[in-house]
Amino acid sequence: MRIVLLGAPGSGKGTQAKKLMDAQGVPQISTGDLLRAAVAAGSALGRRAKAAMDAGELVADDIVIGMIRERLKEPDTDPGFILDGFPRSTAQAAALDEMLEALGQPLDKAVLINVAFDNLVKRLTGRRTCTACGQMYNVYFSPPKVPGICDRCKHDDLAHRADDNEATISNRLQVYQDQTEPLVSYYRDQDKLATVDGEGEPEAIYARINEALSQ
Ligand code: ADP
Ligand code: ZN
């Protein structure tokens, strides 16, 4: 199974990619996670990426395309992969098609997770992650039982991601509209687009994605 998850920031791509990964036994490949790891490690690549990420802009195509090219060489991707957050521009999508063509392993589907604009803002501003165990919360939709305390490990530091502040969020949504939304017609033209309603419980959305993938 070789698929791309498409959707705005806050549409739940990461949550759904993890579920698919567990069920299908194929890796989730998130350029956001790979970039945050590079920033945390302080590598040259991370230093180049950080300013763009903090501003909510796209990191340069050559960086993310190079990262994906390397990642797809790992043997765990032989049975397939779930791309989450890549491609994010038509240049990236074309580069991906070229790579997969060379491997003789074209993409099966691009699944668009649709969420209304107003909900995206709330999902993003409410998002918190436990700095100790990585458990995710949303103060509006799925708060911890005791405010500020992780249900899972009782740690008392639930943090915002660096780019989940109001100014950066509105820029990320604008960048999505300008640069990533064109991929919807890109994949529709290839007859690979499936669209699912991204509102509601994660489990319900997951069921819709599986339904779309089985068609
Ligand atoms: P979200 O989808 O919630 O914005 P991500 O973790 O996917 O979060 O991405 C965080 C940031 O990392 C983006 O705002 C952007 O700066 C950078 N990034 C991630 N993927 C890409 C990509 N494919 N191309 C360019 N920049 C990217
Ligand atoms: Zn925790």
Image (cartoon, grey):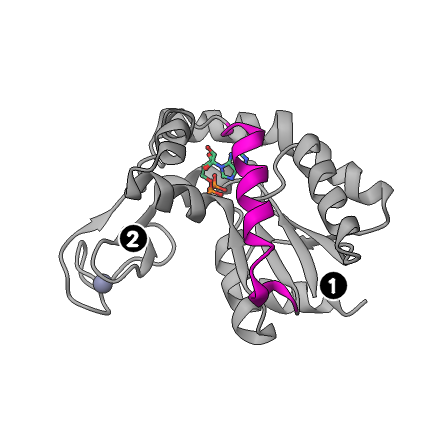
Q: Specify whether residue 71 is painted magenta.
A: yes
Q: Is residue 37 left or right of residue 214?
A: left
Which disc, if any, is residue 147?
A: none
Residue 144's place in the image compared with 11, above or below, is below
User: Which is more toward the observer, 48 or 164?
Assistant: 48
Q: Is residue 94 at least partly visible in the picture? A: yes
Which disc, if any, is residue 129?
A: 2
User: Measuring 75% from the left and 55% from the top, which residue is drawn there?
Assistant: 103
Q: Is mark 1 within 8 Å of ligand 1?
A: no
Dominant secondary structure of the residues highlighted in magenta in the image: helix
Q: Position of residue 98 (x, y in %)?
A: 76, 42
Q: Position of residue 176 (x, y in %)?
A: 58, 32
Q: Amino acid at mark 1?
A: Ala
Q: Amino acid at mark 2?
A: Thr
Which disc, if any, is residue 212?
A: 1
Magenta region, residue range = 58-78
Task: Mark 1 or mark 2: name the one nearer the start of the chain.
Answer: 2
Marks 1 and 2 sit apart, C-alpha to C-alpha, by 30 Å
Q: Position of residue 169 (x, y in %)?
A: 42, 31
Q: Is residue 201 at least partly visible in the picture? A: no
Label 1 close to label 2 by CB (< 8 Å): no
Residue 52's place in the image compared with 112, above or below, is above
Q: Is residue 172 left or right of residue 7?
A: left
